[in-house]
Image (cartoon, helix red, strand yellow):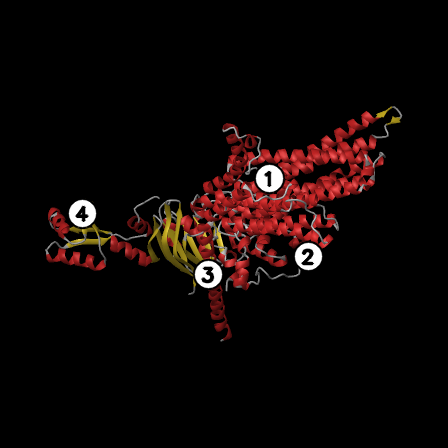
Amino acid sequence: MSEIEADGVQGNEVEQAPLMERLSDRLSPILVKEVRQAMRGKYFKITFWITLIMATLVGLGVCLEGVSGSHVDENLGRGFFIAQFACLIVATHVLVPFSTFLSMGGEWDENTWDLLVLSNLKPRQIVLGKVLSGGVQALLYYCAFGPFLVFAFLLHGIDLGVLFTSLVVSFIVSLLLSCLAVAMSCFGQGKFTRVLLMVLLTAALVWTAFGTGVWGAGMMFRPGMLHDTEMLEAIGAGLTIGTAIAAYFFAAACSRLAHPEENRSTGLRAMSLLVVLSGLAWMSWVLGSRGRNEELLFGACMSITFLFVTSIFYSTEQGRLGLRVAVTLPKNRLLGWLALPMLPGGMRGLIFYTLSSLMVFCWMILHPLLATGSLPFRNGQVWIPLMMMGTGFIYLGFPGGLLSRYLSENWGRMTARIGVVALFIASIFLPAVLGYLIDLRSWAVWEHPLNLFMNFEYLWDNDLEFGAGVILMLVLLAITVLINGPRTLAMVKEHKKALAHRRWVLQQQAARDAARQQPEAQ
Amino acid sequence: MTTALSVLGVTKRFGKLLAVDNASFEIKRGEILGFIGPNGAGKTTTMRICATLDMPDSGDVLIDGRSVLSNPREVRERLGFMPDAYGAYVHTTISEYLDFYARAYGLRGRSRTRMLDYVKEFTALRPLQDKLITALSKGMKQRLCLAKTLLHDPAIMILDEPAAGLDPHARIELRELVLALAGLGKAVMISSHILTELSQVCSTVAVIEAGKICATGTVDEVIQMAQAKHSQVFVRSLADREKVHRALLEEAGVTSVRPHKNGLMVDFEGGEERLARLLQSLVERGLIPIEFSPNQVDLEDVFMSLTKGQIQ
């Protein structure tokens, strides 16, 4: 036993400590560190004081504008609030998320990342700590703006409900933006990528800040909107979509921070599934006992589109399971096989896309059946999601299957991903160009079997005909399945091996534990 | 002594470059292993694999019986790694830095306070605890990193070039710290280019070149191994130098002979037995030497003898 252990300073022993110390133990270490660093750093100090000075000057300007002699403009309170809200939004929607972006990037720039990994903090803890530190900084801004906002309220003309809603919504948006910023920072460590990401992030932050500012000002001038059900639904929907996007980015950041040989995909796939399920649950709730074909088709098509977009990444992952993934497989053999679509790997990604899209299709059929006892779809409408799913399968499966041998390389994955998008665009444009060249009028005006949107339009008004379009799709599907045959076989073989390895590791562990317990028993 | 760290046939490639080639060695508790090799030999890669930061293409590393492949989290709880290049957070004092890592390692309440006190005392950082890290000297930063590495009381310490860039005074202090760590029963793996420093602290050595482990064992064993490969003997005889020169060249194991001071320096391949036979042969030929002194071999000679300075 080492001297340190002998001293009784072992890690997990929690002794009675002062209340504040015990409370601080509950906080994320990253949060504590980040807040300490931010408070000492120049960035926060300078931006904080500049924002406050600007808010004061702008507030003074608004007051001077609104007061002439003894006459006080009745909208002075609103004007003052909007001016302060604008300054607050710039700080919490642009400056704070940007600081979290820099802070995450700093871990690589300042060469502290390895030490952070060795400290055994999970990627989730690191990302959450950074996001929460953004939240704390935003809260400091809200506190600092408190006196200005109280002053605005005292100037009259301000609806307290609107004021409260604007502040709460803007705070939530600020947190979501911090999440986005941290995630974007994890996506690239090269200089060029970082600059590009910085530009993209700045654009997104400014755009969102502008949107929130305009929304807040609109609400202030029409406070009645707050009692409008549609407005409340819109706020709810906006925040839900925002939270879903931020949660997805959060999962993406965690996956980027994980070791390349660890499981970087299951979390993301689970998040995709969660986003789709929440969306479908929300739609089921909104639709209630209604079962209108447009709404159901909209829900199904949007969900499949989301699954398609995210599966561009999953279906082009390298086929091999990471060295640290096999040992995390479920102990039960059946569960091990059921978990297959959620595990990393390109072919597993394609299976994930297919199964989750089928689930969406089932929802579209089952919801109206359970709610009204009948299907509201006319003509070939019911086939639209299936056709969409099939086309998505072809787009995802073609490049991934053809390049499966090269997906372990960065360039291979990138080529396959670009290939999916290129195939999508080419399948719509190339036949049209060909039609123009060979003077095939219907093709030249986009009416060709590879144009997904034309097919949807056709199915909306007509029954599905087992014509050239359907046959072409079935042939392409068969080719895609064939192309992906070798990687499917490799996947099955590897999965079997991984499950066997998992069992072997468990046996080894049990033997080790038994060997360790024997001397103890003696 | 129980084995703390076992490197089992580790191979690592970076593209076409074979960085580590089937490396195997082990360290026992309380032992200090010097990991030596020229630049680009694969030392840092091996150490990073042991620290779970990189993955081997084949083979495994067991830390206290836990595999770096399958149990990286358990391994990290038992391992302290001090990389050759690491950064420190700006606007952070020594106290805050250590406090952050103590929290990250899961230390809570008074346990954290006591552990922080202990490592500050052990590394003599207490007087500087309120200083900003950016204001510290290189030696002090090394101490800080060592303190950070000790926070979770790891059983195995891996120190990659800890003495690089330190002045002689700081090097001596570091040496004492490393010896104290081994005294606490920790297994220490240390890489350095300052071989004289290493020879004073290491009980065992592993020599790596071009990704391959050339030799491993206790310092004496490795020196003997190196001597078996190549050694030098100074010979001085009262007989004619030319005659002695020719006689020496005729002997088995002698690779070259050159005049040195008032005698001859003989480059020799073979062990002590062969060396004894060389002396016997000179005596039998009547060229009795009045001085026959094999050079004392140290780690530096071992390093030069076993490696060719191959950079990958």
Q: Which residue is labeled 3 in the image?
A: A501
Asked if residue B131 can be seen in this view, the reply is no
Left or right: A340, with A290 as reference point: left
Instruction: Kindly report the distance in space between the C-alpha atoms of the residues bearing marks 3 and 1.
Output: 47 Å
Q: Quadrant of the C terminus of chain B?
A: top left
Of marks 4 and 3, the one in the foreground: 3
Q: Which residue is labeled 4 in the image?
A: B257
Are dots 4 and 1 on a single chain?
no
Q: Percent from the top left, x then y, of residue B20?
A: 38, 50
B112 vs A101: above or below: below
Q: Between disc 1 and disc 2, whose residue precedes?
A: 2
Left or right: A373, with A72 as reference point: left
Q: Percent from the top left, x then y, of residue A47?
A: 66, 34
Of marks 4 and 1, the one in the foreground: 1
Q: Which residue is labeled 1 in the image?
A: A455
Secondary-structure class at tag 1? helix
Secondary-structure class at tag 3? helix
Q: Between disc 2 and disc 3, whose residue precedes?
A: 2
* Residue type of the residue flagged with mark 2: Pro
* Residue type of the residue flagged with mark 4: Val
Looking at the image, the residue that sits furthest to the top is A69
Instruction: Kindly report the distance in space between the C-alpha atoms of the residues bearing marks 4 and 2.
Output: 76 Å
Instruction: Kindly report the distance in space between the C-alpha atoms of the residues bearing marks 4 and 1.
Output: 91 Å
At x 81%, y 28%, the residue is: A63
